[in-house]
Image (cartoon, rainbow, N blue to C red):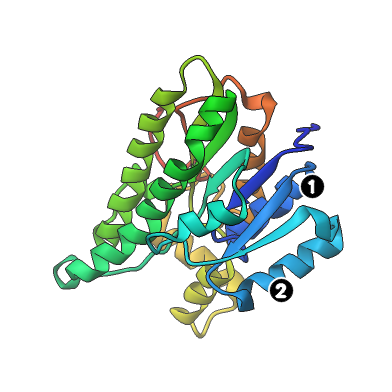
């Protein structure tokens, strides 16, 4: 399917690796110009170089700034005043005992997972509404629907993203702007693979992954980690005109782990 994102500019927060990098790659493949974001030049430069080799330097732009920090969104807007697609992918996670999770831990989680997206939407979405066209996509998580005791602060931040996404969608009536959320399940990023291997040092990775699914996601219907490119395919579709009728939705891309019909 040709998603025809030619002449569109996308900002994908935290896009130097993992799901964010896969999303950037997919949007570029569909013709978009993409702004690659990371906290430092050291992480942004190699990601930009890798994508520029594939798609051309003129379509791969760099934004080296920590978007979880207040005011960083204004730096982004000063450098890139207009975008057509905003993908709020920036996020962090942690396994924490609830009783030892501090206020500072909660604050850091929300600054990264929630406030970064709020600030970017506040910065860029009004112009989308004035133009009458645009896309805002929040990368949430299955745990927004199935909160985990060991990740209370993370689960809460991802549920908050769903609420914000739906609230912003209510502002789009009568326009061709859409706001949606995508809910991946466990995804085969380097950080998750390293974690799975670290807690199963004596197992081959394939066996360690199966053990992870057995113990942590036994309800998964695909019964494996998702590939970053599979999540990126969903995001690219939502970014396109093909998905114009989808607005205010929470799109589950979690392999059937959540055992509900809605």
On the rendered structure, is 147 left or right of 256? left
Q: Which mark is residue 173?
A: none
Q: Quadrant of the C terminus?
A: top left
Q: Position of residue 172 (x, y in %)?
A: 47, 23
Seen from the viewer's position, the closer of residues 75 and 14 is 75
Q: Which mark is residue 46?
A: 2
Secondary structure beneath disc 2? helix
Question: Above or below — where is 14 with respect to 256?
Answer: below
Q: Which circle, 1 or 2, is nearer the viewer?
A: 2
As measured in the structure, the alpha-carbon distance from the residue carrying label 1 to the one carrying label 2 is: 18 Å
Q: Position of residue 241 (x, y in %)?
A: 68, 26
Q: Could you tell me if residue 60 is visible in this image?
A: yes
Q: Going 76% across and 33% down the picture, which residue do you hit?
A: 3
Label 1 Cα neighbours within 10 Å, binned few <14 / some 14-19 / many ≥20: some
Seen from the viewer's position, the closer of residues 183 and 261 is 183
Seen from the viewer's position, the closer of residues 80 and 4 is 80
The residue pinned by badge 1 equals 29
Of all residues, the one furthest to the front in this rendering is 78
């Amino acid at each position: 399917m040709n998603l025809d994102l030619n002449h569109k500019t996308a900002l994908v927060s935290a896009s130097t690796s993992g799901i964010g990098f896969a999303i950037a790659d997919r949007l570029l493949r569909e013709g978009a110009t993409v702004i690659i974001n990371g906290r430092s030049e050291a992480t942004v430069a190699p990601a930009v170089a890798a994508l520029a080799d594939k798609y051309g330097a003129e379509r791969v732009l760099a934004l080296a700034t920590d978007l979880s920090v207040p005011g960083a969104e204004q730096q982004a807007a000063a450098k890139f005043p207009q975008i057509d697609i905003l993908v709020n992918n920036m996020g962090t996670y942690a396994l924490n005992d609830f009783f030892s999770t501090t206020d500072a831990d909660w604050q850091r989680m929300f600054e990264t997972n929630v406030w970064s997206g709020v600030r970017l939407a506040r910065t860029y979405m009004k112009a989308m509404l004035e133009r009458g066209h645009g896309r805002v996509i929040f990368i949430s998580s299955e745990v927004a629907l199935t909160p985990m005791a060991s990740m209370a602060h993370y689960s809460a931040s991802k549920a908050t993203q769903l609420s914000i996404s739906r609230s912003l969608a209510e502002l789009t009536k009568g326009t061709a702007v859409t706001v949606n959320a995508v809910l991946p399940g466990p995804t085969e990023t380097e950080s998750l693979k390293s974690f799975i291997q670290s807690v199963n040092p004596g197992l081959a990775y394939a066996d360690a992954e199966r053990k992870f699914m057995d113990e942590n996601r036994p309800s998964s219907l695909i019964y494996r980690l998702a590939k970053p490119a599979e999540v990126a395919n969903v995001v690219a579709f939502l970014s396109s005109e093909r998905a114009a009728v989808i607005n205010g939705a929470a799109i589950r891309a979690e392999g059937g782990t959540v055992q509900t019909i809605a």
